[in-house]
Amino acid sequence: MHAGEKFSIREVVFWTRREIFWFLLIAAVPTLLYDLMGWDFITIPWLPIALVGTAVAFLVGFKNNATYDRLWEARKIWGGIVNTSRTWGIMSKDYVSNSHNPDPVSEEELEAIRKRLIYRHMAWLTALRFQLRQSKPWESIHKKHNKEYRQLYYVQEQDDPIEPELEKFLTKEEMEKVLKAKNGGTQILALQSQDLRQLMERKLIDDFRHMEMENILKEFFTLQGKCERIKNFPYPRQFATINLYFVWIFIVLVPFGMIQEFQKLGEHFVWLTVPFSAMVAWVFHTMEKIGEATENPFSGGANDVPMTSLSRTIEIDLREMLGETDLPEPIKPEKNILM
């Protein structure tokens, strides 16, 4: 997520500089053929080009709305994860007690159980975000312009292994189970449920509180499933592909229509076709590119949901609930990008 006031002109030009070169070249070729070679027949009336441009604008607008919806839904899901995680923290801290236990255990053991439940939840957050950052074939993060921009900032889930992060929160046995599982997040929630059942059998949680905590686990499963739905189902390829083709068709046609429009201003004004065609092409293509960059909100791009930062916020809150004072620092933006 970009955490600055805005993307600077320098950043935008850096991101689109290759396309700008191609737009200038595409506009220069027909202008050169018209002015120097005398190929008057290559001009096209502006009306059909404008009709194509109108259709392209509608398609690009539709795509940007749809991809923004994917991004906003992803952010709402993680907002739910933040709130539900805090609920899990207070339940773990307050529900685990000796109040219904005929054979009370020590307060130290109760604190160890509460810590285990909360730390295991932080492991779930870690496993979930590492899963969501895994690259998919349809994601655009591997494209040259995004890959190049991606080198400007650090994405923990793609730059570091998961094992050191899980070691902070899980036992060795639990880590082995999670790392062997195809879906580590699901395995961790299963371990939580198993632990709750054992605590109920030991009378450290009564039936009602056990049911309430199981409902929280159910909500975590639901939130994880919603994230996986966005991650594993791309923006439909037919829309993404046709949009891109139509944008490039319009970009190629623009200079053929602009030539005669600028020719009306005078003999040498025809060369204004090059910068103005490139500018129109840049606007349309950048709109398409913005939609593409918003399609996959968990891919590690500059416009992603800041899962690492949100997870750290949750971790700080939960550690404070446990009474810990040695807290990690909040994640800060790097080059204005917050991950």
Image (cartoon, grey):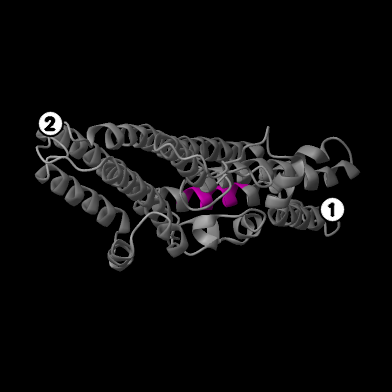
Q: What stretch is highlighted in magenta?
A: 242-250
Residue appearing at x 21%, y 35% in the figure? 97
Residue 281 at least partly seen: yes
Which of the numbered marks, if any, corresponds to residue 35?
A: 1
Left/right placement of residue 252 relative to residue 266 reads left
Quadrant housing residue 182: bottom left
Mark 2: secondary structure: helix
In the image, 195 versus 330, the foreground residue is 195
Q: Is residue 278 magenta?
A: no
Task: Indicate the secondary structure of the residue bearing disc 1.
Answer: helix
Callout 2 amino acid: Phe
- Please tell me which residue is depicted at 52% across the width and 52% down the height of the picture: 300
Q: Residue at x 33, y 50 (%)?
A: 120
Q: Nearer the viewer, residue 147 or 190?
A: 190
Tell me residue 214's x, y (percent).
18, 39
Q: Where is residue 313 in the image (x, y as percent from the top left)?
A: 49, 38
Q: Nearer the viewer, mark 2 or mark 1?
A: 2
In which quadrant of the rendered image does the N terminus lie?
top right
Callout 1: few (<14), some (14-19), or many (20+) C-alpha neighbours within 10 Å?
Answer: some
Q: On the picture, is 80 further left or further right than 39?
A: left
Badge 2 is on which residue? 208
Q: Distance between the residues labelled 2 and 1?
A: 84 Å
Query: How far across and down, in percent of the image, does residue 91 sit?
Result: 27, 33
Task: Judge whether 84 appears above or below 235 on screen.
Answer: above
Q: State the predominant SS element of the stretch in magenta.
A: helix
